[in-house]
Amino acid sequence: MKNPNSSLEFLPTTFILVGIPGLEAEHIWMSIPFSLMYIIIFLGNGTILHVIITDTSLHQPMYLLLAVLALVEVGVSASTLPTVLGVFFFGITEISFDACLLQMFSIHSFSIMESAVLLMMSMDRFVAIYSPLHYMAILTLPRIFGTVAVIGLKSMLLMAPLPVLLRHLPFCGHNALSHSYCLHPNLIHLSCGDISINNIYGLFIVTSTFGLDSLLIVVSYGLILHTVLNIATGEGRRKVFNTCGSHVCAVLTYYVPMIGLSLVHRFGQHVSPLLHAMLANAYLFIPPIVNPIVYSIKTKEIRHGIVRMLSKKISRV
């Protein structure tokens, strides 16, 4: 039977980006906080990266994983920057189909990497607390770098089919997105064809990455808590909780907005477009802003490294 919409089906050459729904007239003013957020993200994560790379005393598994996390968050932010600033600064609301697919691939690939790195960091903390004498023997630098390489490759391979699947979907005149960047759940809802394969594969990606990662993080912290409760001294417990506090904050700032955004995309067809935009922005902007600040404040070694870096720069002036 012929699809009644077949005469309207087409492959869009461009998509229309939306900034903050209902605040289109204020976009030039909205560019100021977005610009500040990008400055904080690149400056904060760049500082963390520079300190860890240049300070040899920080070439330990915990800090190297933090450097990878900072690099991944820079990648997520760099993926959204061209279209976000284009919309708010210059009023450029169109993005080509191919550029949109590339941006979607980049954002989701880095997001999958970020989730996996957070899992690695939780495993690092578990090994450090459960078996401190074997910590350096278990988490060797080759193992860390090899695991990070596998995470990067896995993320890209998982995402590779999605642009291909989207290219085979029919669109019927609707090409306005809900955000100022391209996300897969938003794109498939613009199609007028059968999106069951996209939904099934998308669900597979979510459960095999974010779902499995979050479950293993919870298990890791359950084991950490069990180990901590067996520590006799209150001072020892305090040190452990202080060490894990920054990572728990990073996990919460990543997963809470992501879960909220996923629920809205899945069940919030009648939810305000403003809420869609705000949750998407929270998911993409809060973690890379908060994490460098938290780690700089809570982690003594990072704080001291930043102080040493600034002292050297001041002494050269």
Image: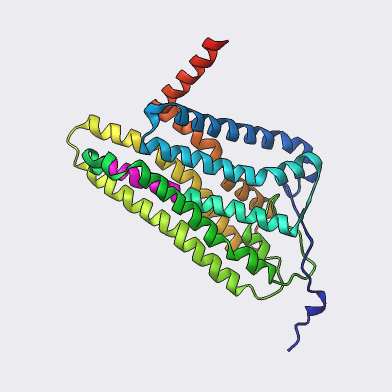
- Magenta span: 116-128
User: For the point 54% across and 49% down, which residue is it?
Assistant: 257
Q: Is residue 100 left or right of residue 293?
A: right
Q: Nearer the viewer, residue 161 or 249?
A: 161
Residue 72 in picture, x, y percent from top left: 53, 44
The colour scheme is rainbow
Q: Residue at x 58, y 35 (%)?
A: 41
Does residue 287 appear in the picture of this structure?
A: no
Q: Quadrant of residue 97?
A: bottom right
Q: Is residue 121 magenta?
A: yes
Query: Looking at the image, which is closer to me, 233 or 188?
Result: 188
Q: Residue at x 80, y 67 (%)?
A: 173
User: Would you say 298 lies left or right of 105 here?
Assistant: left
| Quadrant of the drawing holding the N terminus | bottom right
- Image quadrant in which you'd find residue 270: bottom right
Q: Quadrant of the C terminus?
A: top right
Q: Is residue 181 above or below residue 240?
A: below
